[in-house]
Amino acid sequence: MTSSDQKLRNPIFCAIDTPDLGTATTWAASIGDHVGGIKLGLEFVSAHGPKGVMQVMKASGLPTFLDVKFHDIPNTVAGAVRAIAAVKPYMVNVHASGGRAMMQAAAEAASEAAYEHVVPRPLVIGVTILTSLADDDLAEVGMAASTADQAVRLAVLAKESGLDGVVCSPLEVSRIRAECGPNFKLVTPGVRPEWAAANDQKRIMTPEQAIAEGADYLVVGRPITSADDPSAAAQRIATALAA
Ligand code: C5P
């Protein structure tokens, strides 16, 4: 059994991006009735560790995506996945560019840890190419492929290595879906309702468009957390998706 067998209220995971524990718990509590899950990333986890993560999870009462982007040798990544699995996340991620053996070790560690803690296995998701990188940036680190081609290549490798899905731009969803099939989970940031500011996200789609393209989970941060009323903003996105 994997955590994806749990029924989510909707596919929205709200990115709780703050290093402040009080702010994180307040946001989590206020949106808990409207989104499907929350996402905590390196900023928060580095500041507050697993204990802080559990406090915010409790405040929201929701499944949690731990966006920790592990990238190291297979043995170390396996150990990190086993350790973080103790907080019972819905989903964790690793960099797909860490390679086949690293991803296989991460997937096996998640299964072992779930068995040990008697919980559903967290989904293990690969990060393909960060959306902050352009083709020139890849060339500079010695990768000749375009960002889109490299993202598809890493998604296929992630699938072959036993991962459950990948994080990708909404604009890459249809290509990766075609290559990796209907059961591979696609998680997309870069999602903006028409009424929200784009902020620093460049390649965006609305929540409705991203789902229509074939995304399984939408990561939405500032359109909710920077709104005057985060609860109302989350509800507005959820209602539009349900229509
Ligand atoms: O506030 P916003 O909706 O832009 O938040 C998006 C979230 O998704 C942030 O936590 C950001 O770090 C994360 N993310 C992203 N692009 C990626 C991977 C993660 O925006 N490629």
Image (cartoon, rainbow, N blue to C red):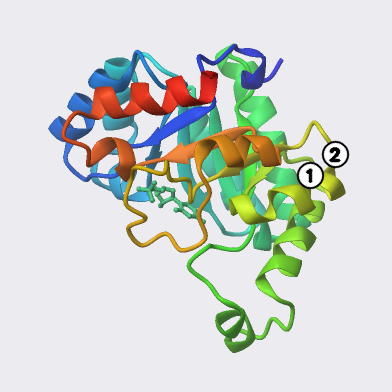
Q: Is residue 22 visible?
A: yes
Which quarter of the rendering shows the N terminus? top right
Q: Contact, CB < 8 Å: mark 2 with mark 1?
A: yes
Q: Residue at x 51, y 51 (%)?
A: 69
Q: Is residue 91 left or right of residue 219?
A: right
Nearer-the-camera pick, 16 or 157: 16
Q: Position of residue 177 (x, y in %)?
A: 78, 44
Q: Is residue 78 left or right of residue 45?
A: right
Which quarter of the rendering shows the C terminus? top right
Nearer-the-camera pick, 242 or 224: 242
Other-residue count near label 1 (Cα within 10 Å), few / some / many at <14 / 14–19 / ≥20: some
Q: Residue at x 57, y 59 (%)?
A: 72
Nearer-the-camera pick, 215 or 160: 215
Question: Toward which corner of the image does residue 223 lie, by quadrant?
Answer: top left
Nearer-the-camera pick, 3 or 236: 236
Amino acid at pointer 2: Gly
Question: Toward which corner of the image does residue 44 lie, by quadrant?
Answer: top left
Q: Is residue 69 left or right of residue 180?
A: left
Q: Give the vertical position of 53 relative to 88 (above or below).
A: below
Q: Secondary structure at mark 1?
A: helix
Question: Toward which corner of the image does residue 146 lie, by quadrant?
Answer: bottom right
Q: Which residue is mark 2?
A: 181
Q: Which residue is mark 1?
A: 177
Q: Secondary structure at mark 2?
A: loop
Q: Give the vertical position of 88 relative to 193 (above or below).
A: above
Q: Is residue 55 visible?
A: no
Q: Position of residue 233 (x, y in %)?
A: 30, 29
Label 2 to label 1: alpha-carbon separation: 5 Å
